Image: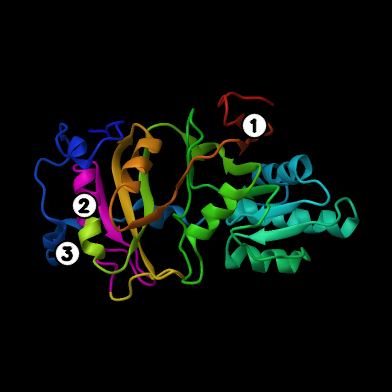
Amino acid sequence: MASVASSSSSSSTFSTRLLLHSPTTTPLSNKYNTRSRRSSYRPNFVRMVTRSCLDDSSALLQAAQYTVDTYVKSGMVVGLGSGHASGMAIQHLGRQLRSGSLKDIVGIPTSVASASEAAKAGIPLDTYQESSQIDFAFDDADVIEEGTLVAIIGRRKLQSEESIVQEKAILNAANKLVFIIEENQYKGGLEGSIPVLVQSLNWMATAEEVEDMFLGDAEVWRRPSIGQAGPLGGDFPLLTREGHNVLDVIFTSPIVSLAEVAKSLDKVYGVVDHGVISKIPCTVVIASQNGQRILDKLTADIVG
């Protein structure tokens, strides 16, 4: 299969490379008028958002507890992530506060869901400001690229009041960041979707430019707020809190370099942000039945 070229040059670099999985291309606007080619396809993010419930002995719960016990200290301002593992970490953080093991913690939630979970756990909360000083943050990731620890977030179904922009801002503002994932979420040759936030005005022109950039390697769908995904986003396309549409750039060929994909997206007019995050320092706690695997951003080697 063709793979995304690891180059940060202009979109012409992508459009001239050898195409193996898509011998012909059609303008995006034409695809929206003829849906038959895509009618049976479902992007990966739709299949990946549902995770089965885990019991108290689960490896993921242990990883969440390890993250709180190892990295959170009394007096910290903590960025509270979104997702299943983050929810368990928030619950454990609340228990540590109630028991007196931790004191004077202030949480800054990355989403409405994490704010709700933290409120139930009894964690004092503050809202994020650009001037916020965040000591530590933890979060889920959809996948993390092997060796580089570059992460993708935002594949989960978003509510209209949630914001990938704010979630990334909180993670980037933290002095220390930890992602909590399972073993099957740490891999090389990533495929599946990258959420891309675009200006809602003239979104189709932006979508066409993005699809041309990754010609033959990815398809572009506008995310719906309800119902099934489709090129147009259905009758009710998702509009974020900031008023942006979300494009899911669905890679069907392995991505050689997630960082290079992010650089290319950053150059596209109309792209506001995306779900790729690369931060130093960063640690990944991988839940395993044999205990936690700890990877550090600087070396991507197992350190504990």
Question: What residue is rendered at 26% in x and 54% in y?
Answer: 220
Name the disc covering residue 294, or none. 1
- Bounds of the magenta segment: 208-234
Q: Which amino acid does label 1 sit on?
A: Ile
Residue 217 colored magenta? yes
212 relative position to 158: left or right? left
State which quadrant residue 281 falls in. top right
Q: Local crowd at mark 1 within 10 Å, few (<14), some, or many (≥20)?
A: some
What is the crowding at mark 3: few (fewer than 14 residues within 10 Å), some, or many (at least 20)?
some
User: Disc 1 versus disc 2: distance between alpha carbons?
Assistant: 38 Å
* Above or below, comparing residue 103 to residue 150 in the picture: below
Residue type at the position of mark 2: Glu
Q: Give the farthest residue toward the bottom.
A: 235
Magenta run includes residue 72: no
Judging by the rendered image, the residue that carries numbered circle 3 is 32
**Closer-to-camera residue (286/69):** 69
Q: How crowded is the residue under tag 2: few (<14 C-alpha within 10 Å), some, or many (20+)?
A: some
The residue at the point 31 percent across, 68 percent down is 200
Which of the two labelled residues, at mark 3 and mark 2, occupies the earlier sequence position?
Answer: 3
Residue 35 vs 143, above or below: the answer is: below
